[in-house]
Amino acid sequence: MSEVLLHAEKIDKNFGVTHAVDHVTLDFFKGEIHALIGENGSGKSTFTSCLTGIYHKDSGTFTLNGKEINAKNQVDGNYQGVAVIVQEIGTLSGLSVAENIFLGKEDEFTKFGVKNTNAMNKKAQELLDAYGFNYIKATELIDNYNFEDRKLIEIVKATHFKPQILVVDETTTALGEKGRIELFKVMKQTRDDGRCVIFISHDLDEVIEQSDNISVLRDGVFIGTVKSSDVNTDDLKKLMVGREMSNNYYRTDYDEVVSDEVVLKGENLTVPGEIDDFSIELHKGEIIGIGGLSECGMHEVGKALFGASYDREGTVTLADGTKINDIKTAIDHSIAYASKDRDNESLVINDTIQDNICLPSLEDIKRNHILHGKDEKAFAEKFAKQMSTKMEGVHQFMSALSGGNKQKVVLARWIGKDSDIIILDSPTRGIDVKVKADIYQMMDTMRKNGKSIIMISEEIPELLGMADRIIIMKDGRQNGEFKRSEDLKDTDLIANMV
Amino acid sequence: MENEKKMKTPFMERPIIRNIMPFAGFIFIVVLFAVLTNGQLYSMGSLKLLLSQSYVLLISCVGVFMVMTMGGLDFSQGSMLGICSVVVCYLSNYNILLAILCGVLTGGIIGLINGFFNVKRKITSFIVTICNMYLIRGIVAYATTKTPVYGASNITSYNTLAVNLTFTIAILLIAFAIFQYTGLGNRLKAIGAGETAARFAGVRVEKTKMLVYAAAGMITGLAAFINSIKVGSVTSTAGNQLETQIMIALVLGGMPVNGGAKVKFYNIILGAMTYKILIAGLVMLGIEPKTQQLITGIVFLIMVAVFADRDTGMIVK
């Protein structure tokens, strides 16, 4: 193998009492795409964030080309030769494309305290053209471009100065086909120049396809490095989880009869700009999967049924005739909803695990109309433990938990509320295989206990694997319905989505 | 290992510091002024005076405490105390119970106006209550243009230790019970920490906000009664600066200015007493009012910096 480009020596990082990265020592070579994988909270992003200056490591050293580097912030990291493309939006609204590309580097275009905007715009446009994105205009506001294009601009921003190390952190999940191809092109270019890409992704197929070597982290500890050509996804899963995955990832039955009893009926639901005359009937013990492209309106269906949509027309009715028009009524009548937007809608992120689990159930926890702190704690502990949430205690703040554990708290809340109708929007988004398996297991148990579930999902295998019935949406309307069957193929669903 | 991990949390960010600081500050100020005034501050006479000056602040802190827990602010409290005192004093000439009732109602109505503009018109509470502060101050000035509004001649006869203390303690106890044991506290904290998520967990956010603004006004109506029996009349300056005193007191008591999950009910009592002792001590040392303001300003700034909940972000709702 070729020379070492970056050497990480005993990198260590703690968040409070969470040991996020535990003395990781790792080498990255010139001319490789090096994937970093692991479950949620295994420390991948924290490790690279310490490298790129997003976080500050507690101890350890990074040595790039024989010289120790210590990035104080992202711009400083850029000057030291490392750059990162992140999962979320990494561009700032209200600024022009050129200003975003050269954010923090305006000094390069400043003479005698005056910024030469024209020179900056010109340079930015040259870069955009060189990347083949000539339809993007450097002088325009970034707000005029969609998510995908903004991501492309971010790629230019992170790579135009040819960083020695390029970190690609979960970027692909946010990109469409076109964006992915562009990104992979840039990654390959970086490798072929004899530089190095650190590639973080949950998509194991993609990891094997794109990378040369794969390193695995588990609970902040470095497990090992394998050659991508020597492994398959099952090998990787084993390394990540530390145990063999059971075969019944999804439920296995195919011919169970669903009850005729309708528990929830949505009729002629319309939300302007989102959904258009959508109707649905949910039966007792049934799992309905709703799928489609991200913008097809399916996410709004969950909100509409939960009484959380603004301007909703149409009716949502329960078996006993109750009409659902607001969230409080929905919850009081045993409907639960876990939003796709976990950090803003599902959870009060700056509050404790206990408060989050208890919030909808406060009235139920009361004894003789009085709420006791002890009872709240016991309630939260019971359901957090039932979901095997990884935590110090229920007094811990949500912000300290990893994505998978946050989702466990969301589910613990609704299991605690003992809701009969559960609406799950993207329940396994950004969640690792182990927690995914737990969630599927939980859904199956709920179904058998007579609870009804609506699962909105962008992941087709999940829809095929879990749902009794799959509704595909397109442009806000229903566009096909499929019954559970072993013969159902992903291509059947996709045909109705696009 | 365990120790090493604990060391890593920045000193000021540790929960234990947040919990201990206000108590330590209280004790520090108590001891500091005991030394500086040679113990005079804690003579029977001074203590009585200190207490008699604390009732109004203690009571009106309760309402603002709830507003601030939700992440809001209320600057209209001082003017509100003024207008409620006008109502109480005026009506006390007819019937004292009617006076209290209408004082509370007046506060409640102003609270609802605050709530309406904040909740329905979506204007930040900071702006709404500052507007109302000036508006109501204007009304108070108008009502007291020629002469102060005098209460009934016997109104100051209610100004006894027993009445004041019972009244104040009762309000604090009732508020505490409601905050702690009905789930209201949990809901308010959730709104302060994350309004959208609170709504999705079934909290009726708009209704709760209206209720809290109204309650804050009504509680100030009660404070106006205590204020009226102490003074016996209202001038145009009644309740001046009360709003800032309340804010400083709550922050001294350890309350994060942006509310949220880290709020504790004891912030009220601890804060009000720390503030009052600080001021009484400064007065006793013969420090000029202007210098007093300077000192409280500095203390306030330090405490805000220490207790702000940076995770929640400095967003005023």
Image: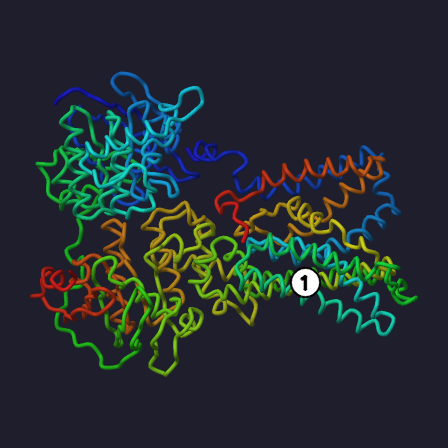
Give percent across and percent down for residue B287.
82, 35
Q: Residue at x 49, y 47 (%)?
A: B312
Q: Is B62 displayed left or right of A177 in the figure? A: right
Q: Chain of mark 1?
A: B
Where is residue A242, by image quadrant? Answer: top left
Give percent across and percent down for residue A98.
32, 34
Give percent across and percent down for residue A477.
23, 69
Disc 1 crowd, CA 10 A, few/some/many (<14, 14-19, 20+): many
Q: Residue at x 34, y 79 (%)?
A: A318
Quarter holding the C terminus of chain A? bottom left
Q: Residue at x 25, y 74 (%)?
A: A285
Give percent across and percent down for residue A180.
18, 43
Quarter holding the N terminus of chain A? top left
Farthest residue in the top direction? Answer: A66
Q: How is the image coloured?
A: rainbow
Q: Is A91 displayed left or right of B2 in the figure? A: left
Relative height, residue B216 to residue A118 (above, below): below
Given residues B170 and A478, the one toward you in this image is: A478
Where is residue B121, by image quadrant? Answer: bottom right
Please name the residue that numbered disc 1 is placed on. Answer: B217
Q: Amino acid at mark 1?
A: Gly
Q: Secondary structure at mark 1?
A: helix
Relative height, residue A359 to residue A5 (above, below): below
Relative height, residue B51 to residue A134 (above, below): below
